[in-house]
């Protein structure tokens, strides 16, 4: 009986490791210029199997505790950043999620996006770029501890 239990645990171990090596979850966004924690973003799977991300909490803003996206165009113009979907359309390709889009609420611009879990899923490399991935900038987000 004990052997079966150990075998079951060993069989499930790779599944639990994979579960942490996905962008799905809550992340502390770290500003690539200041190093400050800016917000909490939740990455989730959509009904079409792609990933999207929304801001669940703004932690540091020069526009006060409940900033609006005044630089955004269209439907997001002057909408609260908290609750806003800022990433969408990310498709799983190998160990990355690519071909998506990401909105920078600070300047209102939308970029192509790529996300890659690193350090066994404890961190997330987020790259926004125009045209080619070489022409952009990256941030490293840190996974929120499970409650």
Image (cartoon, rainbow, N blue to C red):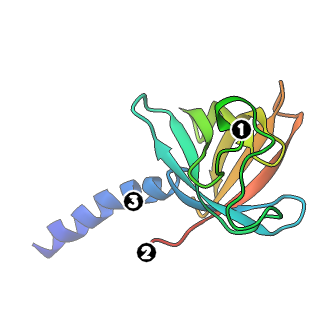
Position in image of residue 45 (x %, y %): 45, 41
Position in image of residue 84 (x %, y %): 60, 46
> Alpha-carbon distance for marks 2 and 3?
17 Å
Q: Secondary structure at mark 2?
A: loop
In the displayed structure, would residue 92 be above or below residue 81?
A: above
- Mark nearest the camera among 2 and 1 is 1
Name the residue located 52 percent from the left edge and 39 percent from the top edge.
51
Q: Nearer the viewer, residue 62 or 37?
A: 62
- Mark nearest the camera among 2 and 3 is 2
Q: Which mark is residue 77?
A: 1
Name the residue located 83 percent from the left edge and 24 percent from the top edge.
131
Q: Which residue is mark 3?
A: 16
- From the image, which quarter does the C terminus lie in? bottom left
Of callouts 2 and 3, the N-terminal one: 3
Q: Can residue 27 be seen here? A: yes
Q: Which residue is mark 2?
A: 147
> Alpha-carbon distance for marks 2 and 1?
33 Å
Category of crowding for the residue at label 3, using alpha-carbon neighbours closer than 10 angstroms: few (below 14), some (14–19), many (at least 20)? few
Of callouts 3 and 1, the N-terminal one: 3
- From the image, which quarter does the N terminus lie in? bottom left
Place residue 48 in its image quadrant: top left
> Alpha-carbon distance for marks 3 and 1?
40 Å
Q: Nearer the viewer, residue 7 or 72?
A: 72
Position in image of residue 72 (x %, y %): 76, 38
């Amino acid at each position: 009986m004990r052997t079966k239990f150990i075998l079951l645990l060993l069989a499930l171990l790779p599944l639990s490791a994979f579960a942490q090596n996905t962008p799905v979850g809550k992340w502390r966004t770290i500003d690539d210029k200041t190093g400050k924690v800016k917000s909490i973003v939740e990455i989730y799977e959509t009904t079409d199997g792609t990933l999207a991300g929304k801001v669940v909490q703004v932690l540091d803003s020069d526009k006060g505790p409940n900033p609006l996206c005044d630089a955004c165009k269209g439907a997001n113009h002057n909408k609260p950043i908290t609750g806003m979907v800022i990433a969408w359309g990310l498709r799983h390709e190998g160990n990355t999620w690519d071909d998506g889009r990401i909105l920078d609420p600070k300047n209102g611009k939308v970029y192509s996006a790529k996300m890659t879990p690193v350090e066994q899923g404890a961190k997330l490399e987020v790259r926004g770029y125009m045209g080619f991935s070489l022409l952009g900038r990256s941030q490293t987000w840190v996974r929120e501890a499970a409650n």
